[in-house]
Image: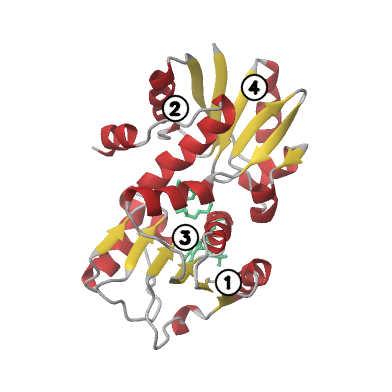
Amino acid sequence: MQHYAVFGQPIAHSLSPRIHAMFGEQFGIALDYRAIEAGPAEFPARLEAFAHDGGVGANVTVPLKRDAAVLCRSLSDRAQRCGSVNTLVRDGEAWHGDSTDGMGFLHDLRDRLGFEPRGSRVLLLGAGGAARAVAFALVDAGVGALLIANRSAERAAALADALGPSARAVAWHDAGTPDRFALVVNATSAGHGGRFDPPSLTLAESTFCYDLSYGAAALPFLDWARRAGVAHAHDGFGMLVEQAAESFALWHGRRPATAPVFGALRT
Ligand code: NDP
């Protein structure tokens, strides 16, 4: 039996144990994947105890993704760029850190939802850890222009600088420009508080809207988009399943089918 876990706070309602159990069943892999509650203060000791007890892989979620990066002996290029880690792989006596959020987002957007970002004009709301992962994935996918608006303007500016010439920071209440966006991505956590302060921009019916959050936290953004008449407004549940599939592939060398897991858990 191989030992895996997801660390975070709160963690009791995490779907990751069910997702990974279903992935394991696809390949006949028996794995023990549990949710371990830990805040930043307890995380280093709990991760060490997990490794001592035979833990070979872990996911890390809010609020530990930056802490996890610090605890790793090595980081993938994408984790280094994002400054955060959501996947830990045991490498001898130490942890290797990776970030699968960006690839998970792209798989959901392109493969399940059929939106091709290459050449598109994109507005990204937010500049936190998930926004950074998504921003680098979008630039790697060849977006035409990436505009970033964030509550704290300096974080948006720093992210745009790190991304290079296709990205630029814009003010939250001045995000609208004469050319409309093909894709608007909400990567803020505002919806967890039940709120979304809409940026001042006009959405076209064809504007594709995507919130990284899912469940109730995505509703304020999705309601705003639907009220504006967009035809496509999606939450991040598919991204959750896809980033988990990327983590699974790092641990087991095989990528599971995501559609059956998405279908089973979505209901
Ligand atoms: P962070 O804490 O790193 O970043 C939070 C972001 O939200 C920052 O840009 C912050 O702005 C902004 N923000 C927070 N509150 C407000 C508010 N009231 N109004 C406007 N902006 C606000 O979080 P993450 O990047 O890790 O997560 C962001 C979201 O993405 C969460 O909802 C999370 O659940 C979701 N997510 C989904 C995943 C999936 O698989 N579907 C994977 C990872 C994340 P500021 O910089 O000003 O503080």
| Ligand 1 within 8 Å of the CB at mark 1 | yes
Mark 4 touches mark 2? (CB < 8 Å): no
Residue at 67% from the left image edge and 52% from the top image edge: 83
- Quarter of the picture containing the N terminus is top right
Quarter of the rendering occupied by the C terminus:
top left
Nearer to us in this view, 177 or 206: 206
Mark 2 C-beta closer than 8 Å to ligand 1: no
Task: Mark yes or no: residue 14 visible.
Answer: yes
The nearer-to-camera label among 1 and 2 is 2
| Label 4 crowd bin: few (<14), some (14–19), many (20+), radius 10 Å | some
Residue at disc 3, CB closer than 8 Å to ligand 1: yes
Kindly identify the residue that appears in the image at 63 percent across and 22 percent down. 56
Distance of label 3 from label 1 (alpha carbons): 13 Å
Q: Label 3 belongs to which residue? A: 187
Residue 73 versus residue 217: which sits nearer the camera? Answer: 73
Look at mark 1 in the image and give the residue it sits on. 152
The disc label shown at residue 90, or none: none
Q: Residue 179 occupies which quadrant of the picture?
A: bottom left
| CA–CA distance in space, label 2 to label 3 | 24 Å
- The reply to whether callout 3 and callout 1 are in contact (CB within 8 Å) is no
**Of the image marks 4 and 1, the number of the one nearer the N terminus:** 4
Identify the amino acid type marked 2. His
Asked whether the beta carbons under mark 1 and mark 2 sit within 8 Å of each other, the answer is no
